[in-house]
Amino acid sequence: MAVHTLASTTGSVSLGPATALSCRECGERFDLAPIFACQSCFGPLEAAYDLPTGDPEALRARIEAGPNNIWRYAPLLPVPEDVATKPNLNPGFTKLVKADNLARELGVTGGLHVKDDSGNPTHSFKDRVVAIALEAARAFGFTTLSCSSTGNLAGAVGAAAARAGLRSCVFIPHDLEAGKVVMAAVYGGELVGIEGTYDDVNRFCSELIGDPLGEGWGFVNVNLRPYYAEGSKTLAYEICEQLGWRLPDNLVIPIASGSQLTKIDKGLKELVGLGLVEDRPYKIFGAQAEGCSPVSRAFKDGHDVVRPVKPSTIAKSLAIGNPADGPYVLDICRRTGGAVEDVTDEQVVDAIKLLARTEGIFAETAGGVTVGVLRKLIETGQLDPAAETVVLNTGDGLKTLDAVAPTTGPTATIRPSLDAFRQAGLAG
């Protein structure tokens, strides 16, 4: 198929193995450019590649010899070859924690791991996707880095722009958790609260892109979205490498826009195609909060489309009522034999505490959603506890203290004396 050259783009750019943008609906191809929708059918665009072929062992050795961050996978990403030498936050290669204590609590016998992305520079997985988008922004000559965000992305954009010496201006719903607001503002860029939900913020940003006010702006999750989204593939790469270059049986992944889940699946398929892992079945499960569960509802109702909802949940990082990748999530979960499930806010809080108590990992509310859904999937018989499972924690609990603060605090408050300690019954 011919590749369309767009007169309105910034000209030819080189982004490693990426060769074009391909429409996920009709397959139409376009030059690498800051565009996100197909001009033929308006379907979403994603990066297409000429990936390395030949000896899988040589490629595996090259990856293993690379830096301990996402740039070890540069041969598989839309980034220039010299990406590791540029000012960047260098996220990735976070811990894959063998969660034996949590496994015993939940009755998992096949092995349970937590991919803990709270160890990234701004303490969420968003550093991965922003790092890729930043390289595209540089290639296209953008001078301002921007985004619409439910919180974590705003902080990641602010930090990455500061490191790269670019201006940042990010947009958030006006009622975000205080911790995320502070973390987005501290990097010195512009932070703008929009009255309304995330979907209102996203619509505003789409309008700004088409206005002269937005000239020179790279919106990481809008006009740079085809590149940005590829950063989530690195979660798939790392999980398989950290498991000894093999696929897990099950993955439980949170759903906001749905992009993370779809790109993890894409990354797994790429590893199989490159011969880096053995091809065998795996199941992908999506996790949502009940107060914003349009994909879960569509899955349970047997629908192929997702009906938008107005979010009402403590899991604000997942509070996207009209998830762009919802239909693709449904297809992947059904194709792999997985499911999409949801949990209440109370179950989210219980799961945050469970993970903290068993594994010493303090997850934000999105991590509470995935662990809560994992427990529900096991209890309802949808996930085989004898199969090896990886559950994602995508952010740090320090960002969402309000979720657990009402039910968490000192065990006791006593006078500074041994008698008082004994009387409190805490002596063991």
Image: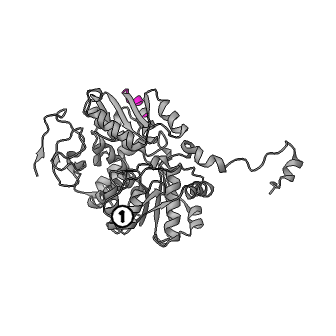
Q: Which residue is situated farthest in the left direction here?
A: 2
Q: Amino acid at mark 1?
A: Cys
Instruction: Name the spot of residue 51 as percent of width and height, x first.
Output: 23, 51
Give x and y (percent) for residue 379: 53, 70
Residue 164 is one of the magenta-drawn residues: yes
Magenta stretch: dominant secondary structure? helix
Q: Which residue is mark 1?
A: 333
Magenta residue span: 159-166
- Element under label 1? helix
Residue 11 in sight here: yes
For the point 31% across and 45% down, the residue is 74
Q: Is residue 299 left or right of residue 342?
A: left
**Residue 158 included in the magenta stretch of the image:** no
Which residue is at the front of the view, 368 or 276? 368
> Is residue 228 or residue 257 the one in the foreground?
257
Q: How is the image coloured?
A: one colour
The residue depicted at 41 percent of the width and 53 percent of the height is 309
Q: Is residue 4 left or right of residue 69?
A: left
Give how far across and how far down residue 198 sits, in percent: 41, 43
Q: Quadrant of residue 279?
A: bottom left
Q: Residues within 10 Å of mark 1 (few under 14, many from 20)?
A: many
Q: Nearer the viewer, residue 289 or 387?
A: 289
